[in-house]
Image (spheres, rainbow, N blue to C red):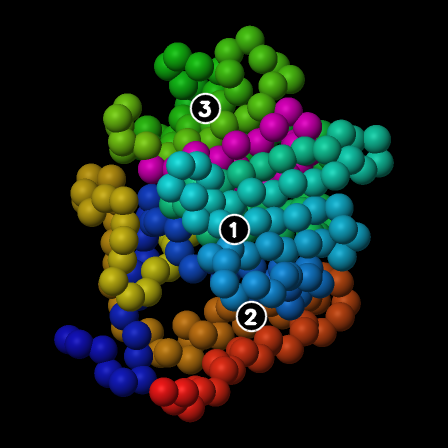
Amino acid sequence: MPPSPETVEVEYVTPRHLAGGGDPAWITVPLHRACGWSHGDDPLMPRVILTSPDQKAQLRLQPDPRGQWWALHHASDHGRPAWYASFGAHTSVEVIAGFVDALTSPHPTYGKEADPYGPLRQADWGPTPTENGLISPNATASVQRPAGEENGPWVATATLGASRPVWQALFDEHTPPYLIAAFTTALAAPAPAIRTGPGRLPTLDPNRITRTEANVPVDLVAFALENRIRTLAARRGVPPAAPSTPRRPPAHPGRTR
């Protein structure tokens, strides 16, 4: 049955790491409206740059066919060296949100020296066959540290086989472990990712993913982002900022010849 004018067709996709990137606004809008991150204003550039209130963290979202689309740089702070994290274009925003929400939380869920592997073990991830790390039960995602580098960088990868990588997330050796643990918690979460419109999923193989379609009220879909914004703003004890007013296009000039 086609959706009525008051509903929109959505897909609930599991595992969430194979649901495609999703809407970047799930990350960028709450950072600005709920967490006070400022953003530049250059409508001629296909990128978003957000800076934390203390000016120590910067998140850049920029289409880059050669590399990672999301990049977060953090300056040195409280004795910890500067660090860097990045996420490929098809990394599900729900998974990135786990990392970003932990970064902006005034009360982190995990201790500063949390074990990033802990949430994966609890979700029945097993040892990877060739590297120091863990792999998901369906063998489509892994989290590793290169063999022999106990203090080295972390690498999370979603794949549909050795020759079909979907996305990769990179965390340098100075990234706080509790943030990586928040990422792995979101990565292993059983909740589906919700996608609207014509999906661009990396695979439709029913042996890899489960898709459930439903017609959902338009207002309910729109409310999901607003509810996320309010929840994150409540952590800071302040109301969320009002939505930005879209810039009007310039008036059409009259003919000059």
Q: Quadrant of residue 28?
A: bottom right
Residue picked out by circle 2: 227
In the image, farthest residue toward the left:
1
Residue picked out by circle 3: 134
Q: Residue at x 27, y 58 (%)?
A: 199
The reply to whether residue 91 is in sight is no
Residue 226 pos. (x, y %): 55, 72
Judge by depth and name the residue closer to the eye, 254 or 238.
254
Residue mark closest to the camera, 1 vs 3: 1
Residue picked out by circle 1: 61
Q: Which mark is residue 178?
A: none
Q: Which residues are magenta?
A: 166-187
The residue type indicated by label 2 comes to: Asn
Residue 48 pos. (x, y %): 55, 57
In the image, farthest residue toward the right:
78
Q: Give the mark nearest the N terminus, 1 or 3.
A: 1
- The alpha-carbon separation of the residues under discs 2 and 1 comes to 23 Å
Disc 3 element: strand
Judge by depth and name the residue closer to the eye, 241 or 98.
241
Classify residue 103 as left or right of residue 221.
right
Q: In which quadrant of the rendered image does the N terminus lie? A: bottom left
Disc 2 element: helix
Q: How many marks?
A: 3
Judge by depth and name the residue closer to the eye, 213 or 82.
82
Q: Residue at x 40, y 19 (%)?
A: 128
The residue type indicated by label 3 comes to: Leu
Q: Give the mark nearest the N terminus, 3 or 2.
A: 3
Residue 168 included in the magenta stretch of the image: yes
Q: How many neighbours does mark 1 have within 10 angstroms: few (below 14), some (14-19), or many (20 or more)?
A: many
The residue type indicated by label 1 comes to: Leu
